[in-house]
Amino acid sequence: MGKSWGLFLILLARPAFCAPNKTFVLAQVDEITSLDPAYPYDNASQNVIFNVYDTLLGLSPKSPGRLIPKIATAIPSRKNGGISPDGRIYRFHIRKNVRFQDGRLLSPEDVRYSLLRFMLMDRPGGPSGLLLEPILGISSTREKGVSLKSIFDAAQKAVRVEGNDVVITLKRPFAPFLSIMARWSYVLPKSWAVEHGDWDGHWSSFSRFNNPQEDRSYLRNHMDGSGPFKLALWNSISKYVILERNDNYWRKPASLSRVIIRTIPEFSTQKLMLKTGDADAISVSPIFLSEVSSLPNVKIIPHLPRLTTDPVFFFTFRVNPTANRDIGSGRLGENGIPPDFFSDRDVRLGMSYAFDAQTFVNDALKGEGKRARSVVPPELLQTNAHFPYRSYNLKKAISHFKRAFNGELWKKGFHFTLTYNVGSENRMAAALILKKNVESLNPKFHIDIRGLDWPSFLDKSEKHLMPIFMRGWYADYPNAYNFFYAFFDSNGRYPLEQQYQDPRMDRLLNKFAAAHNRLIQKELDEKILKLANYDAPNIPVAHPTAIYALRSEVQVFYDNPIALGLDYYYIRKR
């Protein structure tokens, strides 16, 4: 990583009164969907998993860019023999005398099973690709031309146990691998999972386990980790989770005795809970900051860095025209657009220049963030160069729109629908800015804005029905490649939905993934960003920061911009 970024240790003054116990209550908007380490890909679920299941490596609470040993006793390196000279083989020495919360001893075979289970479950839209790509060199077990049996066999060979070590052989050198392992190498007991009807590790039962259409596993609502907390209760109807301290944790037990995480969608209710002491912490949108700033016994912690880019506008290069009202008539003019409307680079550039990102940061984020010059948070880039990017310029927008479709667009106009997910005020605000600016250029330009519930939004994106849509990205691990791959690789999350592909970009990304040398990474950073600026497959808007409002009873509060939520192990109350 090129630059450092902040981790906040907040030491609050002694409160006027102390809480009667060491229970920490978080009220949050997002809903927990599953407690199975291999299934969910949302922050709310992963935050619970992160606090119950240990990983091989971890993130330092004092320096978020630094890794620390957890279930592995050391961080593999070439110097200590943990990484082979060619950068493909990683050896993890497994800590002894670690017990799961039901008393079972953790073994290297548990680690192997957990990694294979995470990698091979591979449900649609799940996190399995985070391990599939570096270890097997594929993004999914459903890749065309590759049999499921060959993938299974390759995985069995790639992850093996040698004595007390787990040895992983990568398909090719993959520089961010250890960062991935620090976030996604959850360890669970194999015998416990098998006893409760989960995959037994064999090929004969694999077809029933791979690519599940629904989360029916026992592990969805039961947990048995080796981490600092254990699951006491998940009420999916009332939408809350209770975690209790694991007093047999292999490290010093946590200070908190209990954590309660409640899903409370309405800010007014969150605010009342904070005011009355029924919640210790809430995350606050900038638009609501003034409503909590003056509450008694409440401390505001603003400007918390996040490795995220949100919102981002995505152009779909080939829209599915079947029964698709989002493209109207399907022809260029004031009643619609053709399916390949955004395949025209001048259209994409016109939209990009018409968007005023700084106004969005000032008005929607209230200064809680910075405008994005690329899809990658600058803290993760090796380059300090002033790489090319587009800023708000209506004259340039007009110039590109006049060139689009050989001059026909300016004469005929266009009409399409821009889609965002309901509940994201920031994405809606950005959509309104783009609509206003573009429509001001030509009376024949028309953009409708539609908000969809999350399931409908995901369904339309997978079917390529939205000509332009809005999403964001929160780092899965602290490396620029995580953003580059998701936004630009032809097999990445968003290019697949956009039907965007540039072989030149794929080649650059393959080189970047294998590059351990920072000078080479810096050179590739600049080439990737330059090509992305030319292709313009998206409009990155902002890198927002976060705000927490805390009760004064919270004495120590660590905020790590890499963790998917709070690490309750380090939080302390009086």
Image (spheres, rainbow, N blue to C red):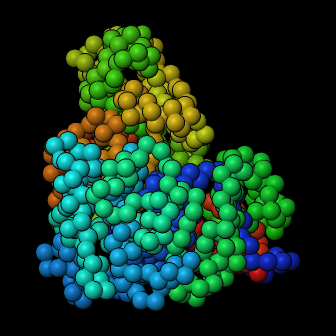
Quadrant in the picture for residue 88: bottom left
Residue 415 drawn above or below residue 521: above
Quadrant in the picture for residue 190: bottom left
Residue at horizontal 81 percent and vertical 54 percent from the top: 272
Query: How far across and how far down the image is residue 256, in percent?
Result: 68, 78
Q: Do we see residue 370 in this rendering?
A: no
Query: How far across and how far down the image is residue 346, in percent?
Result: 27, 28
Quadrant in the picture for residue 101: bottom right
Number of marks drawn: 0
Residue 256 drawn above or below residue 214: below
Q: Is residue 103 left or right of residue 170?
A: right
Closest to the observer, 552 or 525 = 552
Which quadrant holds the N terminus? bottom left
Query: How far across and how far down the image is residue 389, in percent?
Result: 32, 46
Residue lying at the far left of the rendered structure: 86
Residue 213 drawn above or below residue 196: above
Residue at horizontal 69 percent and vertical 48 percent from the top: 237
Q: Do we see residue 25 in this rendering?
A: yes
Closest to the observer, 42 or 286 = 42
Query: How far across and how far down the image is residue 299, in percent?
Result: 73, 67
Q: Is residue 485 left or right of residue 146?
A: right
Q: Is residue 567 left or right of residue 4?
A: right
Residue at horizontal 75 percent and vertical 77 percent from the top: 22
Residue at horizontal 52 percent and vertical 73 percent from the top: 225
Which quadrant holds the C terminus? bottom right
